Image (cartoon, coloured by chain):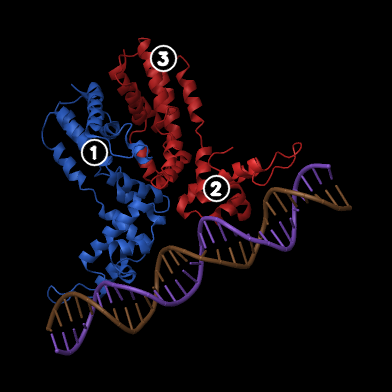
Chain colours: A blue, B red, C brown, D purple
Amino acid sequence: MNEVDGKADAVTMTQPEPQGAGRPAAGEDPIKREQILDGALCVFMQMGFDAASMNDITREAGVSKGTLYVYFKNKEDLFVAIIERQKLRIFGRLQEILEKNLPVVETLHDFGMLFSTHMLSDRTVRGARMVIAVIDRMPQLANLFMVAGPNSGPAMLANYLQRQVDNGQLKEIEDPMMVGRQFGDLCLAGLFRPRLFGELTEPPTAERIERNVASAVRLFLNTYGV
Amino acid sequence: MNEVDGKADAVTMTQPEPQGAGRPAAGEDPIKREQILDGALCVFMQMGFDAASMNDITREAGVSKGTLYVYFKNKEDLFVAIIERQKLRIFGRLQEILEKNLPVVETLHDFGMLFSTHMLSDRTVRGARMVIAVIDRMPQLANLFMVAGPNSGPAMLANYLQRQVDNGQLKEIEDPMMVGRQFGDLCLAGLFRPRLFGELTEPPTAERIERNVASAVRLFLNTYGV
DNA sequence: AGACAATCGAACCGATTGGTTCGAATAAGA
DNA sequence: TCTTATTCGAACCAATCGGTTCGATTGTCT
C-alpha cells in the first residue's frame, strides 16, 4: 500500500482480506484515514510540524490518540503522509492548457495565469512554508514536493516550448528547461517571495497577476517570438 | 537601546553608567551578548525556532541559562534579536555596483552575480527557511527581513534603471519597480525555489549562476536595450 | 587584600510532549 | 440477538520544555 506507512503494509501483509465487502481491518479504513489526514493537514498548516502536537491533531481530526497510532507509526509518518497526499492536481490542468493548440501568446498567458494563481494561493504558500521549515531534517520531502521534477510545471512547459520551436512558432531555444523555469519565475516575479515572507499577507488580485503574466509573456516573446 | 529587548532598556534606565570604563552592568556586556547571539543563530539555523531548545542554545553559546535570561526576556526576544542583527550588508555592495557608471550590460551582470550568489548561499537560504517557518506566528519579522522594502535589491535596481532611462541608455520603462523585481527573479530562475525546498542541496556553481545571469541580462536587454 | 557584582550551574516549577496501554463503548456482520 | 473487532478515552510513562531561583564561583575594581 503506502510505501512510507510501514505499519499499514505490515497489517495488510499479515491479514488476509476479510470475506465480502466486510469491515476494514484496524488501521485500514480509508474514510478514517482521510479524516486523520484532513485534521493533521489543518494543524500542520497552521502551526508547522514542531509546534503542532498530536493532541491538537486528535482534537482537530476527531479521533482518539490510540486510533491515530493505529493508522500512523509516529508524528513524522503522519506528516509525510499528508505531504504525499498533496499531489498537485494542478499539473493535469496545466497540461490541458499546453495541449489546446492555441496561439503561443494565448497558451503562455493561460498557463501563466493558472500557474501563478496556484503558486500564490494561501494553500500553496502555507504548504510551502510547512515543508521549507523541516526540509533540513526531512530531506526525503524534497523528492515528494517535486518543485523541479519531471512532472513539474517548468518541465512540461519546456516540452511545449520545444514543440513550438519544431513547428516554427518560436525561435530556436538552446535550453528549453532553463527557459521554462525562467518563464515560471517571471510570472511569479515580485510576488512569490513577498508571499512566503509574509509581506504580502493576501494572494494578489487577478489583475495584479494579470500584469505580471502579461509582462512575462511580452519579455519572453521579445526574445523567442518569430 | 534595543527596542525589542525591553529588559536591557529597563536595566539601563534604572542603573546609572558606572564610574570610568568600569565593568558593564548585568545584561549590558556587548561581548557576552554577541556570544549569546552567535550561539543562538547557530542553533536556530540548524533546527528552526520551535525545535531549538534554550538548553541547546546555552550549550552552544557557552553561557548559563540564568545569564541568557538576564540578557533576553524570552526565547522569542532572542530569536527576533538575531533576525535584526542579520542586517544585510549586501546592500552596500549592490549599491556600489550600481554607482560605478559602467555600461548597462556590465552593471546588470555584476549586480546579478552578486545578488544571486548571496541569495543562493547556504547562509541566506537557511536564514530564509528559519524566518519562513515562523512568519505566520511572528508577522513582525516580515518588516525586519525587508524582502521588498525601500532598501531592497529590486528597489535600488529600479532607481538605477530609471536613471538609465533618463540618460537614454535604456528604453522607456513603465514600471521600474516591477522590472527591477523581474530582473532579480530572472537571475534566480530555477535556482532559488529548488534551494529552499532542498532539491539543490549545495549552492550552484559560479558557472551555473553565470549562465542564469547572462540569460537574464540578454532577456532584459532584448526588451529594454537601445 | 577586600568589596562588590556578574556569571555559573544545578535544582526547581508547572506544563506539555510523543508514544503506549487497556478496559469500556460502539459498530458491524452473521 | 450474539459475537467479534474497531475505536474511544483517559491514564500512564519518561522525557523535555521555557522560565525562575539562589548559593557558589569567578572576575573586576578600588
Q: Disc 1 is attached to a residue of which chain?
A: A
Q: Residue B40 got which mark?
A: 2
Amino acid at circle 1: Thr
Q: Disc 2 is attached to a residue of which chain?
A: B
Q: Looking at the rendering, which quadrant does residue A13 occupy?
A: bottom left
- Residue drawn at (30%, 54%), measured in percent from left and top? A83
Q: Secondary structure at mark 3?
A: loop
Outermost front residue: B14
Q: Are marks 1 and 3 in contact (CB under 8 Å)?
A: no
Q: Position of residue A119 (x, y in %)?
A: 27, 41
Q: Mark 1, mark 3: which one is toward the viewer?
A: 1
Residue situated in front as seen by the camera: C9 or A90 = C9
- Residue drawn at (45%, 20%), measured in percent from left and top? B98
Q: Secondary structure at mark 2?
A: helix
Q: Mark 2, mark 3: which one is toward the viewer?
A: 2
Amino acid at circle 2: Ala
| Residue tagged 1 | A117
Q: Disc 3 is attached to a residue of which chain?
A: B
Within-10-Å neighbours for mark 2: few <14, some 14–19, many 20+: many
Q: Position of residue A210 (x, y in %)?
A: 22, 30
Residue situated in front as seen by the camera: A198 or B26 = B26
| Residue tagged 3 | B103
